[in-house]
Each structure stands twice: as structure tokens, then as C-alpha cells.
Amino acid sequence: MRTFDDAVRAFLREHPRGTVVTLAEGVETQFWRVDNGRAHWLCVELPETAKVRRALLPDGERRRTPARSALALSWRDEADASHGVLVTAQGLLMYLRPAEVRQLIAGCAEAFPGGALIFDAVPRWFGERTLRGEMKTARGYVTPPMPWALDAGELPKIRTAHPAVTRGARTAAATRTRRVLRRGLARAAAAAGGAQHPADHGRPGPVRPDRRTAPRTPSAARPLRTVKQRARR
Ligand SMILES: C[S@@+](CC[C@H](N)C(=O)[O-])C[C@H]1O[C@@H](n2cnc3c(N)ncnc32)[C@H](O)[C@@H]1O
């Protein structure tokens, strides 16, 4: 939660009137923690959950809840990209099939040049255990299958989802990642272009375009760039 809040706050510092698209937000109340009074918020949720969310957290002037699957991609038309877009997917991608995840990442890269995507992921060993029904709590709750998983070292693979993803794919704060990995949940962040990804703030390291995959585009349609930062030991 804190990693996502930090990323949204950093994005809004750079893009005060930007749009934050939260995929699968459930009844999360992040908006009230990070709102700057000018940002726009689009919470894309499945119809049943969207109904509950709207009942508990009614939409406002700058905050809407389109009731549909994130995979439908039609929500992209409702996101005002004129002041920058940050897409968040917290607690979602691991429940999707790998092909769906690729399609979603590609769809974001295509629609929001210069935008960013932040997501979390479970490591492969964890995902495999959920598929075998082996992840149980002490009280017998069986963790639902998580068909999509990603180890921290595999983050650059995110780039292969779409040629427009040319930067990003690295873990969030290394120390946090190590701590979370110990608990069995890898936090990963993929940046999709922009002058600087929100999670880059205060981080060292150059940002280099991937010349092999970056298409030649006018500056208005800046390609996404990729940088990898290794977790410190
Ligand atoms: C584990 S909860 C995560 C909720 C919240 N993001 C959090 O981190 O607390 C998963 C959420 O994903 C939503 N969800 C599942 N599949 C979805 C889809 N295809 N499109 C949009 N939302 C989806 C569910 O309705 C649920 O609210």
C-alpha cells in the first residue's frame, strides 16, 4: 500500500492535474490519502464490486468508477491523458492469465505514451504453490490460483509486452522488496515512459532508451523507455 501511495504522490507532484487510473481498486481508499485537490481518479472495477464501491464511496466530481473489467480496455477512452496518466494495478495481475497481463500492459503502453504503470506481483514459487492449492492459512483458507507470477530478476521481460514499453521494469525500493519477498510477495514496478517514473524519485541511475525496440516517433508520442535497477544486497 505504501509503495503505491508513494508512487501516486510522486506522480501528482509532477502532474498535479494528472489522471490516476486504479485497476481493481476494490474498496481501497487511496484517493483520500493522496488526493491533491486537482487530480482525476478513474477506478475500473468489475460491476459487482463497482456497485459496492459506489455505495460505500460515492463517485465525485473528479472521481469515477467505470464498472467493467480492466481487460476490456475501453476504460482507456475515459481517461483524460492531457495532463499525464498513471495506471495502478494492485492485487490484480497475479489473478490474470499471462496472455491477459501482456495484453493489459500493451494496451496501457499503446494508449498512454509517456504514462506509467505500477503493479505488484508474486514470485514464481508462490504462484506455483497457489496453482497446486498449497497456499493455506492456519485457518484453512486456500489462496486462489495465481497464474501470473514474476521473479524480480525477470522484470525486464515486461518490455517484451509491447515495443512502446522501453523503460521501467524494476523493483520498487530494494529494501522493501527484500522484506516483502521474505513474506512471499514480490513488489514490482514497471514504468511506462515519461520524463521520470514516479518510483524513480530520489533514485540513482541513468535512464536509457532501448534503441533495439524503441520505434521512431514524434516527441509528442514519446516512446516508453526502460531502465533496470538491481536490488541491492
Ligand atoms: C485482491 S483484491 C485487490 C483490491 C485492492 N486493489 C487492494 O489491493 O486492496 C482484487 C480486486 O480485483 C478486482 N478484479 C478482479 N478481476 C478484475 C478485472 N478483470 N477487472 C477489474 N477488477 C478486477 C476484484 O473485484 C477485487 O476488487
Image (tube, helix red, strand yellow):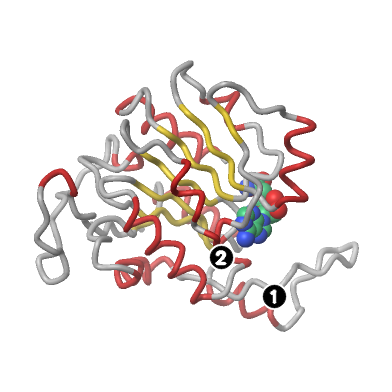
Question: What type is the residue that disc 2 sits on?
Answer: Val
N-term mark: 2 or 1: 2
* Displayed quadrant of residue 30: top right
Specify the quadrant that holds the C terminus. bottom left
Residue at left offset 65%, top offset 49%: 45
SS assignment at label 2:
loop
Residue 216: which disc? none
Q: What's the residue at 55%, 54% (across, down)?
A: 180
Give the residue drawn at x 72%, y 50%: 47
Check disc 1: other Cα within 10 Å, few if <14, some if 14-19, many if 20+: some
Gap in angstroms between the C-alphas marked 2 and 1: 10 Å
Q: Position of residue 72 (x, y in %)?
A: 55, 60
- Reply above or below: 103 against 24: below
- Quadrant where the N terminus sits is top right
Q: Which mark is residue 122?
A: 2
Residue at the bottom extreme, as displayed:
132
Direction from residue 84 to residue 67 in the image, left or right:
right
Residue 60 % position (x, y): 62, 23
Name the foreground residue: 111 vs 3.
111
